[in-house]
Amino acid sequence: MSTAAELPASAFTGWQTLLEAIEGSLDDAAQIAETSQEAARSIDATALFYLAQAVVELRGGDLNNADSSLDAAIETEALDPVLIGVRAEPRLAERLAQRHDTKAWLQRLLARTADASLAKSLGLRVPRTASQKQKLTPREAEVHELIAQGLTNEEIAKVLYISLSTTKVHAKHIFEKLGVHSRIEAARALRNDV
């Protein structure tokens, strides 16, 4: 993570503006945003200034201008500042989730960043990602492949010449290691389509 000394001045000012807005220093944030936005040289800083303006406008009840500021922040394509902004200020996330034209965008962003908890708090569904922390054993990998092919536990047991209970144990371990709850999710995890 960059320290304040390593950040370009415009990015530092952008973060400062957003924090002022989130903390409720609306006048200070609005003044910094207005005077600094024209001087912003980085896309990240520009996105931060728009986000700060959106916070100020949302707190003031000006939804139209808040929406314009949010749209401008999204148009910068600076995803990190936007993501941090929506995580830090619930009003930003809630407004994006409420709007028909930004709800799907926010859902895709949260899916890419695997932020299932924020998505859930906003009533959005994002697929869980497969956990790569634990590798499957060779036998579990075989069972996983057969699950992905649509075979039942009984069929897998016959194909691999193992007991049904052993098959069930392998399936349970696969689900735990991949962080999935269904055979469909397990199949999607094998195809990297989670």
Image (spheres, rainbow, N blue to C red):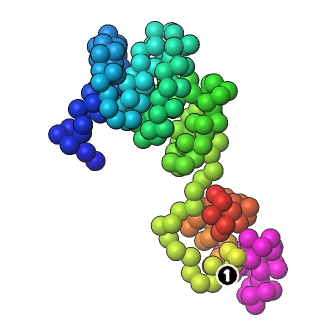
Main SS, magenta residues: helix
Question: In the rendered image, which residue does mark 1 sit on?
Answer: 142
Instruction: Answer whether residue 57 is magenta in the image.
Output: no
> Where residue 159 sits: x, y (%)?
79, 86
Q: Residue at x 53, y 19 (%)?
A: 68
Amino acid identity at mark 1: Glu
> Where residue 43 sits: x, y (%)?
39, 35
Considering depth in this image, is 156 or 131 the residue closer to the camera? 131
**Residue 15 in the figure: left or right of residue 47:** left
Q: How many marks?
A: 1
**Residue 83 in the figure: left or right of residue 44:** right
Q: Residue at x 63, y 50 (%)?
A: 127
**Which image quarter holds the C terminus?**
bottom right
Residue furthest bottom in the image: 161
Magenta part of the chain: 146-169
Instruction: Check the image and report above or below for 118 versus 100.
Output: below
Q: Residue at x 56, y 81 (%)?
A: 137
Q: Secondary structure at mark 1?
A: helix
Instruction: Answer whether residue 163 is magenta in the image.
Output: yes
Residue 174 visible in rendering: yes
* Snapshot quadrant of residue 188: bottom right
> Where residue 86 sits: x, y (%)?
47, 32
- 10 Å crowding of disc 1: few (<14), some (14-19), many (20+): some
Q: Residue at x 51, y 66 (%)?
A: 132
